[in-house]
């Protein structure tokens, strides 16, 4: 009987974690839908509201990445040129 209760607690915990992660991903999608090409990096960061988890430069293009949903934003000359999810 105790083993069954323990399994139920684990299942509920996993369900809560999965639901939380899905909500976080949805929030990022909502925020990214507000972006527009031509925005500055500061404007993008203000809208997204989370620090990027990755930052690299490739061929003169700065690429910011966020782990949640694999979102990215690309900047050239300080302006947003592309964004989305991978």
Image: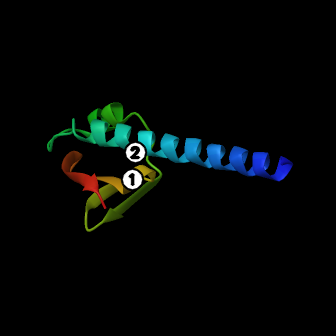
Question: Which residue is found at the position 51% from the left and 40% from the top?
Answer: 20
Labels in figure, total: 2
- Tell me the number on the disc at residue 25: 2
Q: Residues within 10 Å of mark 2 (few under 14, many from 20)?
A: some
Q: Outermost residue toward the front?
A: 1
Question: Which residue is found at the position 57% from the left and 46% from the top?
Answer: 15
Residue 10 image offset from top left, x and y in percent:
70, 49
Q: Residues within 10 Å of mark 1 (few under 14, many from 20)?
A: some
Q: Is residue 76 left or right of residue 3?
A: left
Task: Please tell me which residue lies in front, 59 or 44.
Answer: 44
Q: State which quarter of the image contains the C terminus.
A: bottom left
Task: Please tell me which residue lies in front, 15 or 81.
Answer: 15
Marks 2 and 1, how far apart at CA: 6 Å
* Residue 31 found in image quarter: top left
Residue 22 image offset from top left, x and y in percent:
43, 45
Q: Secondary structure at mark 1?
A: helix
Question: Which residue is found at the position 32% from the left and 53% from the top?
Answer: 72
CB atoms of marks 2 and 1 within 8 Å: yes
Q: Is residue 22 left or right of residue 7?
A: left
Q: Which residue is mark 1?
A: 69
Residue 7 image offset from top left, x and y in percent:
73, 52
């Amino acid at each position: 009987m105790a083993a069954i209760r323990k399994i139920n607690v684990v299942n509920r915990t996993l369900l809560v974690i999965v639901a939380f992660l899905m909500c976080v991903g949805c929030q990022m999608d909502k925020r990214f839908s507000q972006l527009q090409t031509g925005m500055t990096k500061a404007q993008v960061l203000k809208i997204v509201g989370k620090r990027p988890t990755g930052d690299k430069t490739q061929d003169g293009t700065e690429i910011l990445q966020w782990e949640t949903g694999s979102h990215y934003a690309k900047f050239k000359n300080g302006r947003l040129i592309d964004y989305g999810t991978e």
